[in-house]
Image (cartoon, helix red, strand yellow):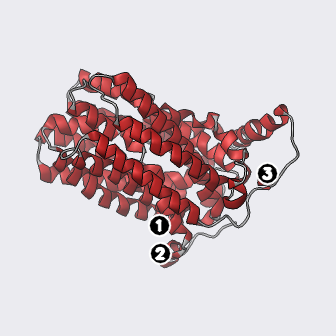
Amino acid sequence: MTTRPDRWRDALLVYKDRRMLFILFMGFASGLPLLLTLSTLSYWLASVGVDKTAIGLFALVGLPYSIKFLWAPFLDHMRIPWLSARLGRRRAWALVLQAALAIAVLALGGTDPATAPWSTAAAAFAVAFFSASQDIVIDAYRIEILTEPEQGAGAAATQTGYRVGLLTAGAGAIALSDFVGWPMVFAALAGLVLLSMIVVILAPHPGIEPARDAPERPRGRVDWFERAVVAPLADLLHRPGWLAILGFVLLYKFGDAIGGVMANPFYVELGFSGVEIASVTKVFGMIATLLGVFAGGVLVARYGVFRALLAGGILQAASNLLFAAQAAIGPDIAFLALTIGADNFTGGLGSAAFVAYLSSLCNVAFTGTQYALLTSFMAFGRTVLSSGGGWLADQMDWVTFFVLTTGLAVPGLLLLFWLMRLAGLRPVREGVR
């Protein structure tokens, strides 16, 4: 049983481990391509005149994030000859997937959504596929290289790098698009994907890899399917309250997802410029997010994952009301800074706690598959369920829309209360298992 730190100083010391630096850079590699199928894509579409309903439907190109568990067993068990022997299974797959991702990003930049939206959608789908696949191996690497008490700090480190990646693909892409064409913007982002490969090569090898990473005698397809697919799923389904766990994973950030997919069209419609959006919603917002994820990592270590989840869930839901106030006030840049600061800080806090929770649920024997399954449920809310956000925004004013997104956070919070009660007879840290 792990003892929770009794002092704030003890909770902070875990950040000194050098492994956290590599986890941070790998988080950057994961975050960089995500916005290319979300808010940056929606800004690009809005700037060339695509209607809001179509922008909302474009969220469906992120479907691979929701179904990545289907091919996670393959990445969890299969090795790349020669490369895996030298780098390990996780880093070998990361290199191959990052090379393919760079090509897909270049292809996306070469499309024209105004005249050929299907080509843009296909390229964006390819970006999402390789990005989601990269996430499988990077997340598994992070969980396997850290002990359980370090998962909170690891979640904060990966979220910090992740947010810097989001800033680069968000603020960087949006601001740069005011001065150069989108093909050049995407070429620069593809170059950063290639640079991320250097980090993967230099990252430390896990001290102990799962036994399945050793050479094995050939086995039948049925046996492989049982080990790679059935066993990880069965392990999750034997957890107490597994149905509530999956529902919570789906709904914890549902309100934020609905609001987030329409955030950039909201800014554009209010009249903010690309530079204003980049400087306030991205640069200033990233600083607030980094403070939030750092605070979330410390809260997990100090008070336990459930209390950190509760604080983050309530605060990130309440912050949506500031967007409703922004809609009523109009294009006031000072109030936008307040809105974005509060929203990103609370979102970062909740994200760090959420990643720590998901990581703690994974059995090291099935890390990639189980984490992919859990994050697929989370991504389902961000993509498929949130694809109706554009239609909702078309049916009501912005004030009503953002008040509604606040209410959509309630089901996830109710499930969290139930899970906290379920874990009440055990120590908090054991209760996440």
Using residue 156 as the reference point, say whether residue 245 is left or right of it: right
User: Mark 1 or mark 3: which is in front?
Assistant: 3
Residue 371, image x, y percentages: 61, 46
Q: Which mark is residue 298?
A: 1
SS class, disc 3: helix
Percent of width and height locating residue 377: 54, 36
Inspect the image, locate mark 2, and give the three-letter code of the amino acid beneath it.
Answer: Trp
Q: Which residue is label 2 attached to?
A: 8
Residue named by callout 3: 212
* Sequence-wise first label, 3 or 2: 2
Q: Residue flagged by tag 3: what amino acid is it?
A: Arg
**Residue at the image point whose x is 66% and y is 43% from the top:** 75
Residue 2 in the figure: left or right of residue 278: right
Give the SS element for disc 2.
helix
**Which of the 4 quarters of the picture holds residue 262?**
top left
Residue 18 in percent (x, y) is at 54, 73
Q: Are marks 2 and 1 in contact (CB under 8 Å)?
A: yes
Callout 2 crowding tier (Cα within 10 Å): few <14, some 14–19, many ≥20: few
Q: Is residue 309 visible?
A: no
Query: Of circles 3 and 2, which is in front?
Result: 3
